[in-house]
Amino acid sequence: MSIPAVSVTAPVGQAIARVKQVLFRPFDLGRWFIIGFCAWLAGLGQGGGGYNFRLPGSGHHGSADFQQGFDHVRDFVAENLYWIVPLAAVVLVFILALWVVFTWLSSRGQFMFLHCVALNKAEVAVPWSRYAREGNSLFRFRLVLGLVSLAVMLPILIVSGVKAYRMFVDGWNGGGVMALIGLGLLLVLIVITLAIVGKLLIDFVVPIMFLHQKTCVAGWAELRPLLAARVGSFVLYFLFQIVLALAIVLIVILAVLITCCIAGCLMILPYLGTVLLLPLLVFRRAYSLHYLAQFGVEFTAFPPVAPPPLAGPAPAAQY
C-alpha cells in the first residue's frame, strides 16, 4: 500500500479552520446548542472524578484504630447480611444498567457528532437514524470491551487490596511490597493498552465506519493495514495528542482564571459545559479526521470543496 507522507502538525491548522467554519461562519447560538447536544451525547458517561482516601492516624496507633474500625464494620455487615446483600445487588444492577444505557447513547452520539463536524451540519434526527446500524455495532464492541476489561482488572484490584490490607495490619515486608509494585505495573500496562484501543476506536475506527458503512469489527480490519504500514506515524500521533491535551488543559485553566472561575462553574454543568467547550471538542474531532484523511481519498470524511464558478466571456464593448 502506497501511503503519502503523514504529518501530525498539518491537521492542526486544518482543524482550526474547521472550527471556524462549523461554529463561527456565521455564529449561530442555536446551532451551537444542537451540535453541543450531539457532542454531549458522544461523551456521555466518559467523565471522571478524583477520590482521595485518608487513613486515620499514623504508626502503630493508626494501625490499631484501623483494625478496630474494620472489625466493627465486619461485625455490622455480618449481622445485617439479610438486607445488605439484596441492597448491594440492586445497586450493582442499577449501576450496570446505567452504564449500558450511557454506552449505547454515547455510541450513537459518536456518529451524530462526527456527522455534524464532517458535513458542517447541525442535525440530530438525521444522523440518529442514518447511522443506527453503525452506532449499535460500536455499542456492542464497547460493551464487550468493557466487560472484558472488568474481568481482567477486577481480580488484580482485589488481590492488590487484600495484600495491602494484610501488610497494613501485619507490617510491611519486602516481598509484599514487590508484589504490590508488580501488580501495580501490570494494572498500569492494562490501563494504557485500553486507553490506546479506545483512542484508536474513536479517532479512526468510528470515522471508517462512518465513511464506509461498516461494522466495528470490519472497521478495525480496515484500520489494521494502516497501523502496520505506518506504526511510527501512529506512535507520533499519540505523542502529539499528549501535547494537544496539555495545550487544551492550559486553555481551559486560562479561561477559568480570566473569568474568575465563572467559566469553571459553567463547565461542570451537564450539557451547558459541553456547549461552552464546543470549539475545543470540534477541534479534537476535526483533528483526527484531517489526520486520517492523509492516508487516502477513501479516508476523507469531509465533502469535496466545490470549485469556484468559471468566469464567463467578457461582454462585448458597447459603443
Image (cartoon, rainbow, N blue to C red):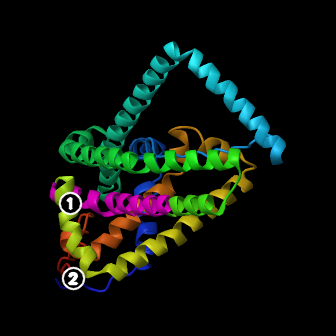
Q: Is residue 299 above or below residue 37?
A: below
Q: Quadrant of the N terminus?
A: bottom left
Q: Secondary structure at mark 2?
A: loop
Picture disc at residue 246: none
Q: Is residue 200 magenta?
A: yes
Residue 10 in sight in this render: yes
Q: Residue at x 40, y 41 (%)?
A: 41
Locate residue 8, reporting x and y percent.
41, 78
Q: Residue at x 26, y 40 (%)?
A: 128
> For the stretch drawn in magenta, what is the main secondary structure?
helix
Q: Report the front residue among 141 and 273.
A: 141
Q: Which residue is mark 2?
A: 317
Q: Report the front residue among 31 and 246.
A: 246
Q: Amino acid at mark 1?
A: Gly
Q: Is residue 38 magenta?
A: no
In the rendered image, which quarter is residue 180 located in?
bottom right
Q: Amino acid at mark 2?
A: Ala
Q: Which residue is mark 1?
A: 219
Residue 123 in sight in this render: no
In three-dimensional space, the C-alpha distance between marks 2 and 1, rounded to whole angstroms, equals 60 Å
Q: What range of the chain is rendered magenta?
A: 186-214
Given contact means CB atoms under 8 Å apart, are the residues at marks 2 and 1 in contact? no
Q: Quadrant of the C terminus?
A: bottom left
Q: Secondary structure at mark 1?
A: helix
Q: Nearer the viewer, mark 2 or mark 1?
A: 1
Locate residue 83, reporting x and y percent.
51, 14
Q: Report the front residue among 220 and 317.
A: 220
